[in-house]
């Protein structure tokens, strides 16, 4: 479903986010106090305006409460972010997503009313560290607080063995639910499937246990 999204702050992160969201077909309002940044992005989004989000009259004028998501993409101007979120909460903005540089900043934004706060630099650093440490992991997704779904290249010690032989569920509490072989992804229906060198498998379970077992 296409959404109406306001992206406030057009630094590297905000600029790229606004353009990516627009390329996905969402209706984007890009906001910044710097007119040069507005001119740079105006041809890539639906609307781009120079505005100060610390002014409640400006927020009312651009009808910020009509947007499905408002993303505060700047993180250096903390006072402006706090004022902006405070005014938006009073206007009952549906969903406010903030950007922070530190965990303390994240806690502050959540306490004053942000619905979600992301830490992109910290998240990027963690992903890079994990990619270097566990190059076999391709993707991972949180299922709940205890379990992850991890897409991983079949480790050498699994090759030419079947699920029945490995007995991962009984020994380690892990479930291999899908396999990608030759570009085709299928649900695993038989424990007698034998893993091959270039297979990619999807494993569900405790993240630490998955890493310990597979690597």
Image: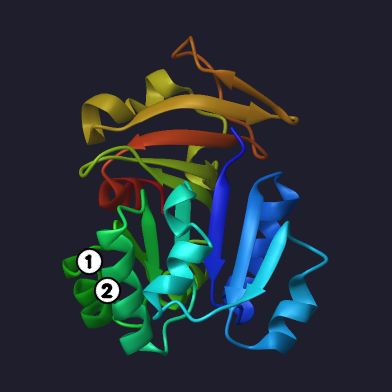
Residue at screen point 45% across, 67% down: 59
From the top left corner, tell me how far across and down residue 27 is, in percent.
Answer: 65, 49
Specify the farthest residue to the right: 43
Residue 1, position as x, y percentages in the image: 59, 32
Find out whether the residues at labels 2 and 1 contact each other: C-beta distance under 8 Å.
yes
Q: Residue furthest left?
A: 111
Measured in 3D between alpha carbons, the distance from the residue under mark 2 to the one under mark 1, in whole angstroms, is 6 Å
Up/down of 214 relative to 173, above or below:
below
Q: Which of 144 and 23 is in front in this view?
A: 23
How was the colour assigned to the protein in this rendering?
Answer: rainbow
What percent of the width, then of the height, locates residue 7? Answer: 55, 65
The picture quadrant where one finds residue 119 is bottom left
Q: Left of 148 or right of it: where is 2?
A: right
Above or below, 41 relative to 215 = below
Q: Eyeballing the image, is 183 above or below 130?
A: above
Looking at the image, which residue is at 57% across and 27% down? Answer: 179
Provide residue 11's location: percent of width, then percent of height: 60, 82
Figure check: 196 above or below 14? above
Q: In this view, does 28 lie to the left or right of 123?
A: right
Q: Which of 133 and 185 is in front in this view?
A: 185
The residue shown at (48%, 10%) is 190
| Mark 2 burial class by Cα count in 10 Å: few <14, some 14-19, many 20+ | some
Residue ID for mark 1: 110
For label 2, the SS is helix
Residue 106: mark in rendering? 2
Q: Which of 65 and 40 is in front in this view?
A: 65
Question: Mark 1: few, some, or many residues within 10 Å (few <14, many ≥20)?
Answer: some
In which image quadrant can residue 51 be found? bottom right
SS under mark 1: helix
Residue 184 horizontal side relative to residue 31, left or right: right
Q: Which residue is drawn at 70% across and 53% down?
A: 22
């Amino acid at each position: 479903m296409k959404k109406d999204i306001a992206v406030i702050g057009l630094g590297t992160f905000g600029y790229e986010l606004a353009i990516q969201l627009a390329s996905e077909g969402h209706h984007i309002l890009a906001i910044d106090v710097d007119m040069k940044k507005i001119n740079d992005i105006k041809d890539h989004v639906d609307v781009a305006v120079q505005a100060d989000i610390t002014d409640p009259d400006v927020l009312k004028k651009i009808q910020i409460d009509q947007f499905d998501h408002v993303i505060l993409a700047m993180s250096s101007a903390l006072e402006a972010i706090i004022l902006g979120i405070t005014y938006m909460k009073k206007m009952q903005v549906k969903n406010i997503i903030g950007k922070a540089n530190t965990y303390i900043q994240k806690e502050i934004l959540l306490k004053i009313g942000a619905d979600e706060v992301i830490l992109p630099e910290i998240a990027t650093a963690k992903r890079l560290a994990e990619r270097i440490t566990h190059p076999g992991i391709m993707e991972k997704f949180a299922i709940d607080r205890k379990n992850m779904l991890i897409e991983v290249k079949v480790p050498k010690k699994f090759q030419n063995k079947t699920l029945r032989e490995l007995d991962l569920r009984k020994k380690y509490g892990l479930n291999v639910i899908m396999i990608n072989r030759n570009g085709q992804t299928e649900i695993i229906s038989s424990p007698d499937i034998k893993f091959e060198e270039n297979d990619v498998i999807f494993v569900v379970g405790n993240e630490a246990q998955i890493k310990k077992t597979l690597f």
